[in-house]
Amino acid sequence: MKNYLTFFLFLTMTAASAHGPVPGRPPPPSDLVQVGLTDSDTTAGGTARLCEQVTFSRGLRYGESEANVLDVAASATKADTPRPVLVFVAGDTFTGDRGAPELSRQIQDQAMCFAARNGMIGVRVNYRLAPAATWPAGASDVAAALSWVHGNIDLFNGDAREIVAVGYGAGAFHVATLLAHPELQTAGADVAGVVLVSGVYRAGKDASDSEKAYLGGDATQYDKRSVFPGILNVDVPIVLAWAADDSAGLVAQGETLKKTLCGAGHCPRSTLLRSRDGIASAFGLDGSGESLAEPTLLLVHQLEARGLP
């Protein structure tokens, strides 16, 4: 009874769609927590302006770990039809950015508000970090989060048939790993498209400390834990990006992935970002020019035009 009342309270409070649960849907994770609808923490001018008329539902649990929570952002003005969903999986490194977590959240909020203000639902996924959580924990968390989205996003007027996963930095590796390793995929964890930004897709002997913390110290395992060759079997559209100011190693990772995918007949749409100071910058929300905004919106419009049943 307690769990039922908690879920009912969530339904009545959230800025969600008017219809109730779909019969036969997998039950939502236990201890679903509603932390707040309207974000009052975005005090930075740029974020506050971008997030006007956007409501947030925060701290929604999708797994057992305290780190397994996600945020949902949607326009305060409800659309007449279910909206596409951008699921953001960000992380500059595999060990996270513990130095300025509030700033990091504000930057990710801007990307979510970009989604909401462009007729989509934004979802930010928090996941377990190395060294406490090692391979394949990141990809497993992404799978669990996507399953939650499939089962619950209609409550926010989102369309589970039009989910685009946006992986940024370490998040790009986690998203690509999930796609490339069928053994990590779970029911309801599929996506309609992906955007991969400045990721490491195959670590080598020169792996960084952060990469070693996640992938382990045995470099002979790195090829098995890379996204190759499984990524070549992915049949959903891919947008691939890296930035002009990325390190030479990151640029090489992106170029290698693009060349390999093109050679397999699945050439991704690619873009070179002018700068990448954070996921908000990657979407050009700082006015930096070349960004992910146009190719991502084009991908979403193409998915909408497919007319899935």
Image (spheres, rainbow, N blue to C red):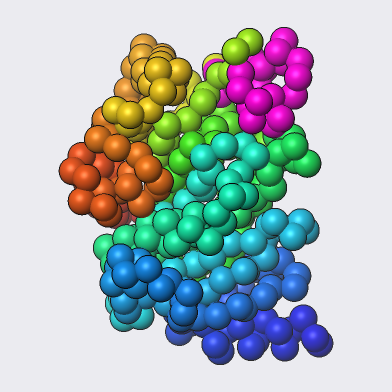
**x, y percentage for residue 61?**
67, 65
**x, y percentage for residue 186?**
66, 45
Residue 180 placement: quadrant: top right
Establish if 91 lies above or below 214.
below
Extent of the magenta region: 207-228
Q: Residue at x 64, y 88 (%)?
A: 9
Does 210 appear in magenta?
yes
**x, y percentage for residue 141?**
66, 47
Residue 36 appears left or right of 302: right
Q: Residue at x 62, y 69 (%)?
A: 59
**x, y percentage for residue 170?**
54, 36
Residue 23 placement: quadrant: bottom right
Establish if 251 lies above or below 11.
above
Q: Residue at x 27, y 54 (%)?
A: 285
Quarter of the figure that contains the C terminus: bottom left
Residue 166 seen by the camera: yes
